[in-house]
Amino acid sequence: MTSSSTNVRRALVTGGAGFLGSHLCDALLGEGYNVVAVDNLLTGRLSNLAHLRNDSRFEFREIDINHAFDCGPVDYVFHFACPASPVDYTIHGVETLQVGSLGTFHALDVARKYGAKYLVSSTSECYGDPLEHPQKETYWGHVNPIGPRSVYDEAKRFTEAATMAYHRYYKVDTRIVRIFNTYGPRMQLNDGRVVPNFMKQALRGEPLTVYGDGGQTRSFCFVSDEIDGFLRLSKSDEHLPVNIGNPSEFTILECAKRVIGVTGSKSTIKYEPLPPDDPKQRRPDITKARTLLGWEPKINLETGLKLSLDYFREAVAQDSPARA
Ligand code: UDP
């Protein structure tokens, strides 16, 4: 079924002005969809969509999905609205919980109303500070429900629960992707995440701020690999969560050294306190994505950082040092 008589499928992307949402809009247009992106611009930016301004198959609407909304018939709902960096979701804690709960219900209601397929962005934060390593989708996690990260972790865990409920009770055709650390062009320079922070610091010749002893690990996926995983999952019939992330695991100190190497910077490393509840390790087990979707990442950290360099150079040039 398509949403119009022209046989062109129409996709809705919530959070369409965000880092992943905007790349997803590009990919869906590439797949032949007409796309309507909605965003309240709390952390999303119109500049991420500026290149689509004159594309007649693309439409942007500034909408707060914490209120019921309706952009007309759609064939697919991609629910990606949510502050995603630890700095952003700490500043916007209540809004994060609201979009995970109210916003998720409203996105699900759109899918239910139009009989649309649905894919929602979830997160490796569902695993918390994991005691199982690497993390399989079957692991229930080790999450502090009241700590500073809980506004995000529990929002996303609720999002997953609501999504499964709409699938079980209302037969909505749902999918859940658990996203691990992703980086690339269009990340906000000042969102506080490790790759933009290190890139900005290295390009300015400032010390890279490694929190704790830098021995904590993350597994970094380049954005084009991540989006490819989303598209493959969108075409599958898997309703249970699927990890999409790069299983190559790095300590944060190693990540800092890679950024210094790729940028050719003379920056040194400065150690700062570890934020509370900062997970000690993160690495996806992607057996499920490999077998079910034939997906695995192609771009290693060094290549991905090189592919991101022009974007970050430009972002640094446009950013006033006073905001750093
Ligand atoms: N981190 C760091 N220096 C920074 C920013 C982050 O050492 O300037 C660390 C942070 O403590 C965490 C890891 O890098 O261990 C990844 O942090 P990020 O905020 O990117 O995302 P998270 O995976 O924690 O959600």
Image (cartoon, rainbow, N blue to C red):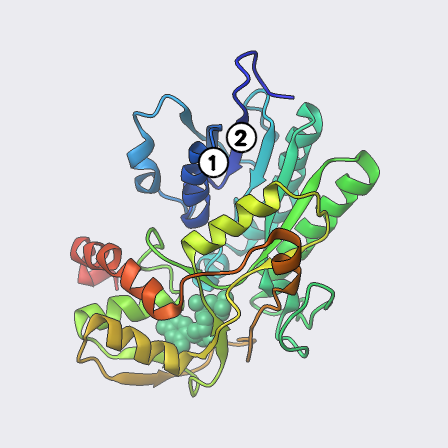
Instruction: Answer yes or no: is residue 311 visible.
Output: yes
Q: CA distance from mark 1 to mark 2?
A: 8 Å
Query: What's under tag 1, amino acid-wise?
Result: Leu
Quadrant that contains the N terminus: top right
Q: Secondary structure at mark 1?
A: helix
Q: Residue at x 46, y 55 (%)?
A: 225
Dot 1 alpha-carbon crowd within 10 angstroms: few under 14, some 14 to 19, many 20 or more: many
Furthest toward the top, the residue is: 5
Query: What's under tag 2, amino acid-wise?
Result: Ala
* Ligand 1 in which quarter: bottom left
Residue linked to disc 2: 11
Residue 72: image location, x then y, percent:
57, 20
Front residue of 144/17: it is 17
Earlier sequence position, callout 1 versus callout 2 = 2
Front residue of 109/54: it is 54
Q: Residue at x 65, y 58 (%)?
A: 291
Between disc 1 and disc 2, the foreground one is 1
